Image (cartoon, grey):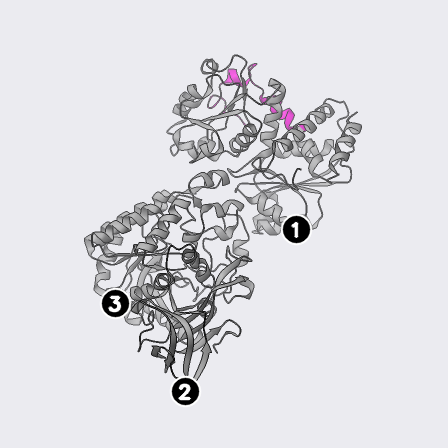
């Protein structure tokens, strides 16, 4: 049922998502052990092909791969032949010729994981492409919400900030809607993508209205350097109108949780008190990211048949 | 010179509003006679019963890349692609290296075309030096050398003051100034049509407003200067509406549309295929419908392909880095016949837009099957379904969204000046 590659949440079915989240729940226990390693992917090679710099996502994939005993090789643009003007497709084909079992791709341009997946024999996982999608982030967010709230269906999830440039927002919109949640977005009009309602969300330009009665508020990182003066007048005004504080959060459900994909601009989109408060599940997201990515590496590498893999997983994690 | 008799075809001549089954006789490079049961004496006879016979097509917007970018295309390969697609006249844009902003370059293109190209090639000169949008070119000298129009094409002249002067000065030489209408500030980094599709793709959007604003500016400047402004590759409903209105008010504005902008929508970009990246971008269904309506009611004069060859390695990359444009000469006919099959245009009216109207705008020979006209003629099977393979085509490049796709309608033979230069079975017949 799951395709060869994981390129977008748009492509996944509800059943696919459920299977991935269930598998990730099994993986969480491994991270709690003293010896955090199982042999599932021993002898498998996973390449992190990161054309765009990333610390947390790359590290999360690397730890996930190592906990499953895979050989994880990191490729980053700065240290590579890219600086010698090799084309991305040649770089990708070169990596493929070394016969990896899985390639994890991040690129600053939307669509690159797709065109690489089309050219490679190894399966590809999209670790973020431009403003398109970041499916592994959405899945770990959904795992976090599911475990905090016990369910996803019926919840109201509000995503706040620069939705226009956000791959995290797009992936979460697809994912949460597929799982039966109501998704709202809130941003200044300059940061609302045209036609976003076609994805099934309600768009707001009032933070208060958008978070009223919400179960989950997900704050997006604002790119201060790049966008100030162009898409919003000043950090101060952004923070006043779209930054979240405990006072502003009062209109949400009393047990509302606060999420952020990181890294946080403290005091800009999110106040100190909230980032560190009881409402915040931000570090839980990071922790779940490892388990979620273990699940994905497991499901997309080696590709055992459907029945085998669930049975095998049960054995290994005992 | 030999006589050629095309026997029993459906003769479609927009110049004389002819649509009837009859014979067509060519001699010494000219149309000698059109009529029933013409004598085959001394003539090579081609049975074209069941087929269409039309004046050769005219494409006033191609990029043949010579001089300077011959790895993408040259005048020889471009000219061959043209006649293989039924085009007997083409006008090539000035963005070569060096730019065609000097009579020496214009001369070079004309000389090279005479030697290498089976199709008639007309140079379009740059409107400003080096396509920089600042200093106007020597229009009189360029026209003297053979330039048929002026354009900076993709390097849109953004300074309205410069554009006003270019238009005003163009009245001296009475040639059209062709505008690639796109406000680069509004476009920003946009690479696909702004809307639900750009949002889904996560790629920067290019709104129709970027086109509409420039069209509005240049219509206003055409009115104030009395110059002839020709809007290239119209793609937005707003542009069509403004051109329709301006023409009704008597402003000298004409327009072209590409086969891809009347056939494909932005949905075609959803797989990130760089062969769907062009400028202006593929638009929404409403824009496609408006472009078709503009072609039907004459708001848009003609079809032009914007044939823009790029090497495989240039397109084999991400959507932002890939250059804009697709090749179109060899697929234009079957793509445009979509509007005939849907009933939007009659065969005669489609031939008018593919041939006669473009010829009028360039003021060049062709576009007519009248007795005495140059015998630029195309023989078409409108119902033949074939699979397009750019590897087997004549362009040096392969950047087409129709690669590997079945197409219906094919050029079977092309005559330039009464000489058979393309036959579907024998290929291009040119030394």
At a point 53% along the width and 62% down the height, the residue shown is: B386
Q: Give the range drawn in magenta.
A: A262-291
Residue B324: give x, y in percent of width and height: 45, 53
SS state under label 3: helix
Residue at label 2?
A: B41
How far apart are the alpha carbons under marks 3 and 1?
54 Å
Q: Distance between the residues labelled 3 and 2?
A: 48 Å
Closer to the eye: label 2 or 1: 2
Residue B383 picture location, percent across and down? 48, 63
In contact (CB < 8 Å): disc 3 and disc 1: no
Mark 3, residue position: B140
Q: Position of residue A167 (x, y in %)?
A: 52, 34
Q: Considering the numbered disc 1 on the image, is that residue within a helix, a strand or a loop?
A: helix
The residue under the point 38% across, 77% down is B24
Question: Mark 3 and 2 residues: CB-CB less than 8 Å, in contact?
Answer: no
What percent of the width, then of the height, locates residue B134?
Answer: 30, 54
Q: Can residue B408 be seen in this view?
A: yes
Mark 3 or 2, nearer chain start:
2
Separation (CA) of disc 2 from disc 1: 66 Å
User: Mark 1 — on which chain does it sit?
Assistant: A
Which numbered dot is residue A94? 1
């Amino acid at each position: 049922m799951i395709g060869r590659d994981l390129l977008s949440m748009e492509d996944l079915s509800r059943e696919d998502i459920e299977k991935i989240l269930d598998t990730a729940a099994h993986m969480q226990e491994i991270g709690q052990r003293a010896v955090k390693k199982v042999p599932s992917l021993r002898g498998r090679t996973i390449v992190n092909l990161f054309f765009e710099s990333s610390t947390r996502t790359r590290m999360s994939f690397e730890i996930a791969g190592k906990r499953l005993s895979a050989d994880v090789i990191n490729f980053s643009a700065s240290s590579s032949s890219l600086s010698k003007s090799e084309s991305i497709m040649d770089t990708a084909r070169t990596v493929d010729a070394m016969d990896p079992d899985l390639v994890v791709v991040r690129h600053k341009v939307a669509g690159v994981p797709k065109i690489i997946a089309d050219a490679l024999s190894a399966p590809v996982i999209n670790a973020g492409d431009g403003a398109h999608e970041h499916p592994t982030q959405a899945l770990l967010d959904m795992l976090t919400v599911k475990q905090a709230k016990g369910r996803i269906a019926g919840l109201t999830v509000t995503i706040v900030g620069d939705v226009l440039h956000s791959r995290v927002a797009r992936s979460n919109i697809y994912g949460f809607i597929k799982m039966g949640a109501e998704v709202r977005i809130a941003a200044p009009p300059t940061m609302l993508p045209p036609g976003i309602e076609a994805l099934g969300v309600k768009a707001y330009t009032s933070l208060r209205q958008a978070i009223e009665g919400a179960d989950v508020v997900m704050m997006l990182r604002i790119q201060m350097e790049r966008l100030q003066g162009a898409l919003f007048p000043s950090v101060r005004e952004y923070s006043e109108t779209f930054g979240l504080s405990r006072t502003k959060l009062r209109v949400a459900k009393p047990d509302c949780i606060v999420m952020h994909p990181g890294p946080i601009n403290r005091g800009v989109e999110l106040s100190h008190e909230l980032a560190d408060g009881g409402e915040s599940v931000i570090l839980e997201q990071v922790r779940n990211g490892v388990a979620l990515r273990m699940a994905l590496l497991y499901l997309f590498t080696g590709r055992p048949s459907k029945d085998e893999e669930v049975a095998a997983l049960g054995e290994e994690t005992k | 010179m030999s006589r050629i008799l095309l026997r029993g075809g459906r003769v479609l001549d927009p110049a004389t509003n002819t649509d009837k089954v009859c014979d067509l006789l060519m001699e010494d490079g000219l149309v000698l006679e059109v009529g029933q049961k013409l004598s085959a004496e001394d003539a090579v006879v081609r049975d074209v019963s069941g087929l269409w016979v039309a004046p050769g097509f005219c494409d006033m917007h191609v990029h043949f890349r010579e001089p300077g970018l011959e790895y993408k295309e040259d005048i020889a390969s471009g000219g061959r692609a043209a006649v293989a697609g039924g085009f007997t006249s083409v006008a090539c844009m000035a963005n070569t290296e060096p730019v065609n902003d000097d009579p020496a370059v214009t001369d070079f293109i004309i000389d090279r075309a005479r030697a290498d190209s089976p199709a008639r090639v007309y140079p379009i000169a740059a409107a400003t030096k080096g396509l920089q949008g600042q200093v106007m070119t020597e229009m009189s000298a360029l026209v003297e050398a053979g330039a048929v129009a002026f354009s900076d094409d993709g390097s849109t002249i953004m300074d309205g003051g410069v554009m006003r002067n270019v238009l005003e000065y163009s009245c001296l030489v009475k040639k059209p100034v062709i505008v690639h209408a796109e406000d680069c500030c509004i476009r920003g980094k946009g690479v696909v049509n702004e809307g639900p599709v750009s949002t889904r793709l996560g790629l920067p959007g290019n709104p129709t407003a970027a086109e509409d604003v420039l069209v509005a500016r240049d219509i206003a400047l055409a009115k104030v200067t009395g110059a002839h402004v020709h809007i290239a590759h119209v793609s937005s409903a707003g542009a069509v509406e403004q051109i329709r209105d301006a023409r009704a008010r008597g402003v000298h504005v004409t327009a072209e549309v590409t086969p891809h902008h009347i056939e494909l929508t932005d949905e075609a970009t959803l797989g990130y295929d760089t062969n769907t990246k062009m400028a202006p971008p593929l638009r929404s269904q409403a824009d496609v419908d408006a472009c078709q309506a503009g072609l039907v009611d004459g708001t848009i004069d003609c079809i032009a392909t914007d044939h823009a060859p790029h090497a495989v390695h240039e397109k084999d990359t991400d959507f932002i880095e890939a250059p804009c444009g697709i090749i179109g000469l060899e697929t234009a006919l079957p793509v445009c016949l979509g509007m005939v099959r849907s009933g939007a245009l009659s065969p005669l009216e489609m031939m008018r837009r593919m041939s006669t109207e473009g010829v009028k705008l360039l003021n060049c020979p062709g576009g007519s099957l009248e007795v005495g006209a140059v015998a630029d003629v195309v023989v078409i099977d409108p119902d033949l379904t074939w699979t397009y393979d750019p590897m087997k085509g004549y362009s040096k490049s392969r950047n087409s969204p129709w690669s590997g796709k079945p197409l219906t309608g094919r050029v079977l033979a092309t005559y330039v000046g009464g000489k058979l230069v393309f036959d579907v079975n024998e290929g291009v017949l040119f030394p």
